[in-house]
Amino acid sequence: MKEQLIEENKATRPQLSKENVWNKIVSYIKRGNINEAYEFALSKKDNDTLMTLMMRTGAVVKKLEVGVLENLVRKIAELIYSGEFSDVLLKWVRAVIDVKEKVSIKGKVALVNAMNDLCEDDERREQLTEIQLNEANTILNMLKMEID
């Protein structure tokens, strides 16, 4: 009964508009709460908002707590798999290598698998510039060394 009431409350609660979500994220950033900004953005399951945040802040992996970083790493792998590849994601994956001690083996494996898929799939490779492909392969090799 209690679970049903909670679910009904969630269903009737108004959802934040995309603009309100972004405003809340910006308020976290202005207060210096990078972790909270990423935690909130990840909870909203809106790839566009998350990618905008990643572009605005740059690859701030050193400022993120372990749990937030781990969730973000898995999300980055998911984005790469889904075809939402961009230079921004490459920068973040490269930055993750710099804080390898903060990322679980499971997170590293997820990134290796996603990057491997990106580099090995002919159709996806055709969408990359030569520079992007070289960078992706370099990052992939670096990640593989981390899990071997």
Image (cartoon, helix red, strand yellow):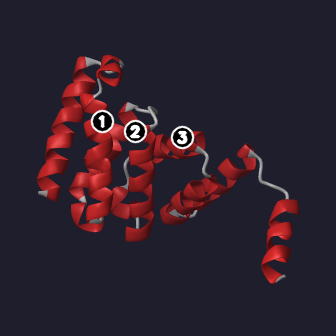
Instruction: Compare residues 19 and 72 and report the one nearer the observer.
Output: 72
User: How much space separates mark 2 and mark 3, taking CA atoms?
Assistant: 16 Å
Mark linked to residue 80: 2
Helix, strand or loop under label 3: helix
Question: In the rendered image, which residue does mark 1 sit on?
Answer: 117
Q: Nearer the viewer, residue 136 or 35?
A: 136
Figure check: 138 above or below 28: above
Q: Nearer the viewer, mark 2 or mark 3?
A: 2
Residue shown at the point (45%, 51%) measured from the top left: 75
Please tell me which of labels 2 and 3 falls first in the chain. Answer: 3
| Residue 30 in view here | no
Residue under label 3: 52
Judged from this view, the residue extending furthest toward the bottom is: 2
Left or right: residue 23 versus residue 89 is: right
Kind of residue at badge 3: Thr
- Residue 132, placed above or below residue 148: above
Categorize mark 2 by other alpha carbons within 10 Å: few (<14), some (14-19), many (20+).
many
Q: Which residue does the image show at 22% across and 55% down from the upper left?
A: 98
Point out residue 111 in the picture as x, y percentages from the top left corner: 31, 49
